[in-house]
Image: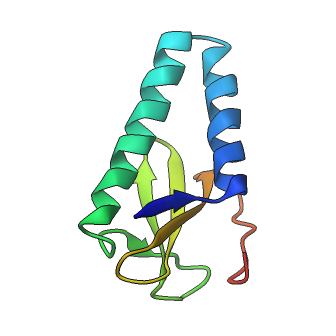
């Protein structure tokens, strides 16, 4: 089951607010696409690549548009989305998050 951390939910809201300033339709589409991509993690938890900065095989990322969706494999049944960051921003995530 995919769960979202509070900080990842906040990131998602921020992305929507930023994009919807120009287009509410496109903002909704981007958010829907991001959420839909996380659904694949229920079946393919290791489908993302290992986050290079952390070098931890349990913390992975999926690239969606210009965003990095960072998630952690907690167990075979539990995946947690930790953050969504713009690909050009420096990653400020520690393994304890």
Locate residue 11, reporting x and y percent. 68, 45
In which quadrant of the rendered image does the N terminus lie? bottom left
* Above/below status of 33 relative to 61: above
> Which residue is at 43% across, 84% downward?
75
Q: How is the image coloured?
A: rainbow
Q: Is residue 56 visible?
A: yes
Q: Quadrant of the image for the C terminus? A: bottom right
| Residue 17 at x, y percent in the picture | 69, 24
Q: Tell me: residue 19, above or below residue 3.
A: above
Q: Position of residue 64 (x, y in %)?
A: 42, 47
Front residue (pair 91, 15): 15
Question: In x, y percent, where is residue 34?
Answer: 44, 42
State whether residue 88 appears in this view: no
Residue at the image point whose x is 37% and y is 76% from the top: 77
Give the residue drawn at x 53%, y 88%: 56
- Front residue of 20/32: it is 32
* Residue lying furthest bottom: 56
Asked whether 36 or 92 is in front, the reply is 36
Q: Residue at x 46, y 66 (%)?
A: 61
């Amino acid at each position: 089951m995919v769960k979202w951390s509070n900080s990842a939910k906040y990131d998602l809201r921020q992305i929507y607010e930023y994009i919807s300033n120009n287009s509410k339709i496109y903002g909704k589409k981007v958010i829907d696409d991001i959420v839909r991509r996380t659904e694949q993690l229920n079946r393919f938890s290791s489908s993302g690549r290992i986050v290079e900065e952390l070098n931890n095989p349990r913390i992975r990322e999926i690239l969606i548009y210009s965003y990095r969706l960072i998630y952690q494999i907690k167990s075979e049944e539990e995946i947690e989305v930790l953050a969504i960051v713009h690909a050009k921003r420096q990653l400020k995530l520690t393994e304890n998050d």
